[in-house]
Amino acid sequence: MSEDTAKILIIDDEEIVLDSCEEILDSGPYRLATARNGADGLRLLEEFQPDLVVVDLKMPGMSGFEVLEQVQKSQPTVVTIVITGYATVSSAVEAMKKGAYDFLPKPFTPEEFRLIIKRGAEKRALLLETIALKRERELLREHFASIVSHELKSPLGAIQQNIYALERELAERMTDDQARRCDRIKTRIGDLLNLINTWRRGATVDIDTIKENFGPVSIDVPITKAVESVMLHAQRKAIDITTAVPQPSGVVWGDEGTLTQTLVNIIGNAVKYSQCDTSVAVAADQVNGTVTVTVTDTGVGIAEDDLPFIFDTFYRARSGESTESGSGLGLAVSRRVIRAHGGGIEVRSTVGQGSTFIVTLPAYEGEPPEPLAAAGTTKSPQEGPG
Amino acid sequence: MNEQKRLLIVDDDPDYVEGIKGILDSAGYETDVAYNPKEGFEALKSRHYDMLLLDIMMGRGAEGVMMARKLRKDPDLREMPVLIITGIRDQIAYLFPGQPVHPGFFPVDELMEKPVEPDMLLERVRALIEAAEARKQQAK
């Protein structure tokens, strides 16, 4: 609707009411359409695309309630106002329950009618504005993510690529100290690039979208892919990744890609926070309709004070002798993904001895499962924003 | 390497190009550069290359994908190995988890994320050229 002309559709079987309404609103910033019965009214709803529908509850043929229901169903952002001839509160209340914005008992004064229309038009304007703002916020979020990705990542990547090249070209001529500093530069830029990648994934994981792609996923598939993905990092640290997955493994209802990403994150963390020459154990199991994946490391562990917060956005545990840096985003995103699958994620940890992450997912047994009753009841009561 | 291999880099970011070219040159490859798909295609038509290193996001969008597709329709160039070097790998990985290559590409393609570690780059380049030569031998 344009700022100053609201389109109003009035549905009433009494011609005198329609005439008076037209008369009353004539001087206002409105465009009017009228219908003598519900069927005509609904036809006009499509043709006229009103902002407001004013409907008499008591009409021969289709009742005002039915019209109301149809309007709610096909055009939920259209604001509806009911006129009630029998000045009973109950029918007005029922109409409001069915989604009417307000009601006007007959007989009404021109002033009352003008006022209720004015308020209705304002309500409609607010509704439209809210929808527009929501859409804008979504767009901004997506664009921001791609701007960050392109405008920050590209130059950083180009810098890194040149350091790689220079390091090789100058290999013969660099002193040990220069080579070491070169290494540091690579590491720091690498950390920044990882941060951007993780951050962008966090900003772009759209839970509703991943649900559209849900299907049966045999849990050994994302586990195998995730282990493969972190293998290089583990080998560099001489960390052995063992897997214990029964065959056939449990099947869950979900999205293989995001489940893989989530496991990459959790197993990757286990590797990241483990000392060299240790091992990380990945195990899967299915008990009573619940598929469980556990990832156990013997790494630095997480302090008790930190445990409640580790799934929060941007939270990074300070304690423990962290040897590598993280973005503080991975677990927050992981939890959102697991929750979208109707599951939960929790952690047990002792500083200096290691951590165990336990992911539980409802098993798929021929039809999409109900979320686990315990879903989300992790040891982390606080929910991070977004 | 018995003869010097000639590679073509197509990427619109001159800094990236220099970084990648530096690594390839120091490993003894002959490398030419084109800064957009049109120039790149002309170069490929004008002389023999053993391999193409191709960026995806160029110009107004995924022009690299268009170039790869055009290449696959060209009878002279369809067997040319292509190493796709892109900044958007994780988006592709997200869409096609666990698959090294976008399904829209071909078996002779590989995909790496920018920035590329020198050892990995050289390893992939060597492997792709070898695979292409083995295919050629078989065809004979």
Image (cartoon, rainbow, N blue to C red):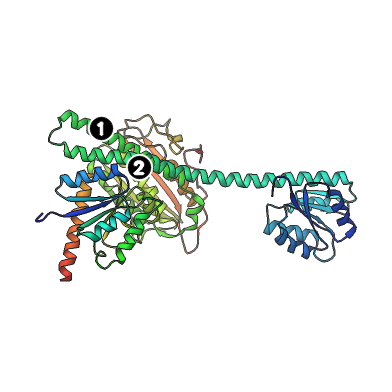
In this rendering, does residue B138 appear at all? yes
- Say if A59 sits above or below A193 in the image: below
Secondary structure beneath dot 2 equals helix
User: Where in the figure is residue A294, as x and y percent of width and height?
Assistant: 37, 47
Q: Amino acid at mark 2?
A: Ser
**Image mark 2: chain:** A
Q: Quadrant of the N terminus of chain B?
A: bottom left
Which mark's residue is nearer the viewer, 2 or 1? 2
**Label 2: which residue?**
A154
Q: Amino acid at mark 1?
A: Arg
In this rendering, does residue A220 appear at all? no
Instruction: Name the foreground residue: A311 vs A71.
Output: A71
Q: Which mark is residue A184?
A: 1
Which mark sits nearer the N-terminus, 2 or 1?
2
Q: Quadrant of the C terminus of chain B?
A: bottom left
User: Where in the figure is residue A184, as x and y percent of width and height?
Assistant: 25, 32
CB atoms of marks 2 and 1 within 8 Å: no
Instruction: Name the foreground residue: A155 vs B59.
Output: B59
Dot 2: few (<14), some (14–19), or many (≥20) neighbours within 10 Å? many
- The answer to whether marks 2 and 1 sit on the same chain is yes
**Image mark 1: chain:** A
In this image, B20 relative to A259: left or right? left
Q: Residue at x 82, y 57 (%)?
A: A57
Q: Residue at x 81, y 63 (%)?
A: A37
Q: Residue at x 12, y 36 (%)?
A: A172
Q: Residue furthest bottom?
A: B140
- Say if A383 sits above or below A16 in the image: above
Mark pair 2, 1: CA separation = 20 Å
